[in-house]
Image (cartoon, grey):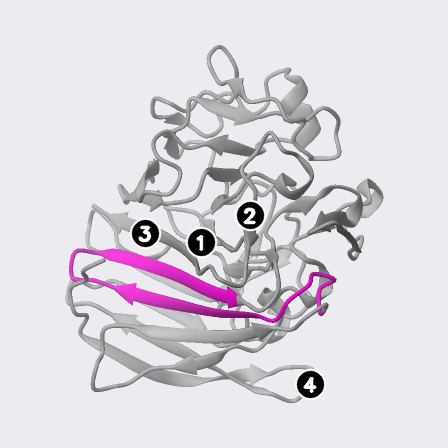
């Protein structure tokens, strides 16, 4: 993809040390329109995304923390780059090339593997790669070692952030493996378009370009294999509506997810960059579009966030944000109704997320 050049990449400051004594750093990308992006080499985490609102006021629209410490072992995954497998694998087990692999069970009583367990890439140091003379991007690299998360193969991953003069933030993921494995990353940012510290998002508007979603059979958050039309259900975001309009109606799927925590099948070719969602801050007027080249998009409305101490003294609670997570359908490895996230040694994983601000 062709990109415009940004104004600068800045090493901002140290961001604290990990529990293992590793020094972390915060980097800032900035364009001439007032957009700023702050990313950390721990988890390659998106810490801050600052966008001018309708009155020109700088507004940080992603939830996050003031230093690295709360990101370590955090269950909310604020701004995280989750891999090698995002979302859930039923029963914390999967079969790859005829071999059964047992994974960490870390999804409460459900017995599932969630976000690849305690060795998730979001909870690791990544190597930052940047050149102040190039000034149009910053990259992070990590090696997810063979069996480190219970998955086979040494998976080498590169994530590049690019901020353009067209107010686009682009995340490009690339990866290769020496054994057949799973490659299904996502960015787990929590968005609040009125500002990260502005409270509930019920009145913010959302459109999802998906005519179908993948319902759960039970409350274990695992898709049943059915691909169901959103028509006539609270899952219908095909036209812009407030996030809170239907979130508390009597509905089995909302009960299972304690709100929205569901995968939508994005319309169009599953491996072409295309519009997946639009959102508008009802107070800020900030308009965001999300494009991706994955089959699905997980909508999560921060249903389980509670008294989370965030940036600048903010306290985050239930439904103070929403996540839009491009990915393969959850548990695709165990369900042949869905496209598999399998990556083979002769292939390259290549996934893109583009956030555009209007």
Lateral position of residue 337 relative to residue 62, left or right: right
Sequence-first disc among 4 and 1: 4
* Whether residue 328 is situated above or below residue 311 in the rendered picture: above
The tag on residue 354 is 3
Span colored in magenta: 148-176
Residue under the point 67% across and 18% down: 252
User: Do labels 3 and 1 touch, CB within 8 Å?
Assistant: no
Question: Which tag, 2 or 1, sits closer to the chain's start?
Answer: 1
For label 2, the residue is: 341
**Crowding at label 1, few (<14), some or many (≥20) Cα neighbours within 10 Å?**
many
Q: Nearer the viewer, mark 2 or mark 3?
A: 2
Counting residues from the start of the chain, the first of labels 2 and 3 encountered is 2
Q: Residue at x 75, y 26 (%)?
A: 218
Q: Are marks 2 and 3 in contact (CB under 8 Å)?
A: no
Image quadrant for the N terminus? bottom left
Residue 262 at what x, y percent from top left? 57, 33
Mark identifier at residue 20: 4
- 147 versus 332 height, above or below: below
Residue 302 image point, x, y percent: 58, 43
State the count of labels. 4
Gap in angstroms between the C-alphas marked 4 and 3: 33 Å
Q: Main secondary structure of the magenta part?
A: strand
Looking at the image, tell me whether mark 4 or mark 2 is earlier in sequence order.
Answer: 4
Residue carrying label 1: 196
């Amino acid at each position: 993809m062709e990109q415009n050049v940004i104004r600068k990449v800045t090493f901002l400051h140290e961001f604290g040390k990990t529990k293992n004594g590793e020094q972390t750093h915060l980097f800032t990308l900035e364009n001439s329109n007032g957009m700023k992006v702050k990313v950390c080499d721990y988890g390659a985490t998106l810490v801050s995304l600052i966008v001018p609102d309708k009155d020109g006021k700088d507004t940080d629209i992603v939830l996050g923390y003031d230093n690295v410490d709360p990101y370590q072992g955090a269950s909310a995954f604020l701004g995280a780059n989750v891999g090698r497998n995002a979302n859930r694998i039923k029963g914390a087990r999967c079969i790859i090339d005829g071999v059964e692999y047992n994974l960490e069970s870390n999804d409460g009583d459900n017995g599932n593997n969630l976000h690849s367990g305690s060795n998730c890439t979001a909870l690791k140091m990544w190597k930052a790669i940047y050149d102040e003379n190039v000034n149009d991007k910053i990259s992070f690299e990590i090696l997810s070692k063979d069996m480190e998360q219970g998955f086979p193969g040494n998976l080498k991953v590169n994530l590049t952030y690019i901020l353009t003069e067209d107010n686009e933030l682009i995340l490009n993921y690339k990866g290769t493996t020496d054994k057949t494995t799973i490659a299904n990353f996502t960015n787990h940012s929590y968005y609040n378009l009125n500002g990260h510290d502005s409270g509930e998002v019920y009145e913010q508007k959302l459109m999802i370009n998906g005519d179908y979603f993948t319902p759960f059979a039970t409350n274990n958050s695992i898709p049943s294999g059915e691909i169901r039309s959103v028509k006539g259900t609270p899952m219908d975001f095909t036209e812009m509506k407030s996030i809170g309009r239907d979130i508390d109606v009597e509905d089995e799927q909302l009960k299972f997810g304690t709100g929205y925590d569901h995968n939508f099948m994005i319309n169009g070719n599953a491996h072409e960059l295309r519009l997946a969602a639009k959102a508008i801050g009802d107070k800020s007027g900030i308009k965001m579009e999300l494009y991706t080249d994955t089959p699905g998009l997980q909508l999560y409305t921060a249903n389980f966030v509670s008294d989370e101490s965030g940036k600048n003294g903010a306290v985050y609670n239930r439904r103070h944000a929403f996540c839009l997570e491009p990915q393969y359908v959850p548990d695709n490895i165990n369900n042949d109704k869905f496209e598999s996230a399998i990556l083979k040694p002769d292939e390259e994983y290549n996934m893109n997320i583009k956030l555009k601000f209007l």
